[in-house]
Amino acid sequence: MKSKFVSLTLAGVVLVSVFAASSGKAMAAAPIVEPGPPGSVQMLQEPLDEIDGVIQQGITDRYMAGSVVLAAKSGTIVKEDAYGYAARYLDDDFTEMENPVEMQTDTIFDLASITKVFTATAAMQLYEQGEFNLDDPVADYIPQFAQNGKSDVTIRQLLTHTSGFPAWIPLYQTTDSREEAYQEVFSTPLDHEPGTHYGYSDLNMITIGALIEKISGERLDQYIKANITEPLGMTDTMFSPPESLKDRIAATEYQPQTDREIVWGEVHDENAWAMDGVAGHAGLFSTAQDLAVFAQMILNDGQYDGTRILETETVEKMETNQLPDFPDNAHSLAWELNQDWYMGDLSGPTTMGHTGFTGTSIVIDPEKETVAILLTNKVHPTREAPSTNPIRQAVAGKTADAINAWSASTMKALVKDFAAEEEFSSDETAHSLKVHLAAVSHYEDQDAAAKVIKHMEGFKSLLDHQEGSMTEGVYETLRTDADYLINKWQ
């Protein structure tokens, strides 16, 4: 009997071991967000340090008054820095405050449209509970929405910006209450037939906010606090922050059109302001570190530090392109996908992100388990500042460089990705680059620094020789990463 018990026990151990080996990510402890050195997650310091110059130049050129940058991989924060001022100006003539407020890493920012991904997360929680199906007509839940030809618009179309709604209407000029604002959105006619056109519209996510309130019986801010931010310990994330936090909040725009001076401590978006600061498209405030926790929850397949916010299958839906017929506008459920105009070299088929009009952005790369967050007060003191997209792209790109240039093997994987994206004019070019990097990787394994440096210099010569058979961006990226790797071994 004892022998049979031992055999069964051993068999169980073997089965558990096999399951653990085959399900790696599921069995491994899910990371939590905490600071650590770049090398601990196979990242280089040098590209991350170069972000400082990008931001400082942006401040000098008045792209923004200040910024906070956070980069993390596998839960490890490898960079978190503050630059410039959270509040500096009194008006749009750039009149300086007597006591400007310096930016801190825990400065609270108006996230603007990044609010949309929190609204979508709230909606998908209700979806998981069986409260609706994605292809249900919105009018099944909000009958007033059926007005003016919208009876067939679905919840999925709202979440993917294919409803046909116009991009924007001035609710702050035409309504006097939150309820009036909702009624005006519900009565707004479409510009396009549902499902035939991608058109980014705040009205989509305002309506999703109304849907959440209708189904849950709670106002949107109360629902998000109780079901997302509070369970995740995101204590600095909220709608309508109290006056007591004003000194920690980044100021935004001088707004005489809303009879406000410098908007500081209340929502910048005029329509969200007209809706008491609480709307599905804008109104949420947060810090870089709180956003990193939210992003890590996504990377952890919907859970963080023992708390589950979304089911794994739901996160997969939110990583999956819902718009194959609109290839330039890859989009999941409220998240933008693979948009290199701000995701830089972190962009890829499953890379998720969103931007905010105030100068905010978040990029989540599930393949690299990496997060790049850029929070700026671009609209302080005026929205007429240059676009921050080049800075967003550079921050994400240098974060990617810190990973891609860690070793010859990671550079080889990068070449493979570029080949899959058809960035080379011939298969032979990609093949020769990968063969060369495989040889360098062999010398890395032997810790032969001189040979690594010599052969990486040879890789650069090979790149120069084959420059015409790859896109300019690929050439520049690979050459820069080769220099980073050489510096690592010198």
Image (cartoon, grey):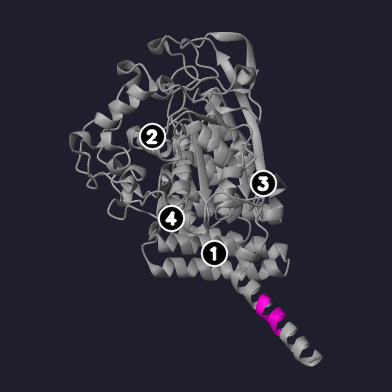
Query: Residue at point 47% right, 61% down?
Result: 417
Q: Which of the numbered marks, if any, corresponds to residue 317? A: 4
In the figure, 360 relative to 363: above or below?
above
Sequence-first disc among 2 and 1: 2
Residue 33 drawn at (x, y percent): 67, 46
Look at label 2 and name its amino acid: Ala
Sequence-first disc among 1 and 3: 3
Q: Is residue 316 magenta?
A: no
Q: Classify 10 Å Cα crowding around label 1: few (below 14), some (14-19), many (20 and above).
A: many
Count all numbered tags in the image, as a single digit.
4
Q: Write down the residue under mark 3.
A: 33
Circle 3 SS class: loop
Circle 1 SS class: helix
Circle 4 SS class: helix
Sequence-first disc among 4 and 2: 2
Sequence-first disc among 2 and 3: 3
Q: Nearer the viewer, mark 2 or mark 1?
A: 2
Q: Which residues are magenta?
A: 11-16
Q: Nearer the viewer, mark 4 or mark 2?
A: 2
Q: Write down the residue under mark 1.
A: 412
Marks 2,3: beta carbons within 8 A = no
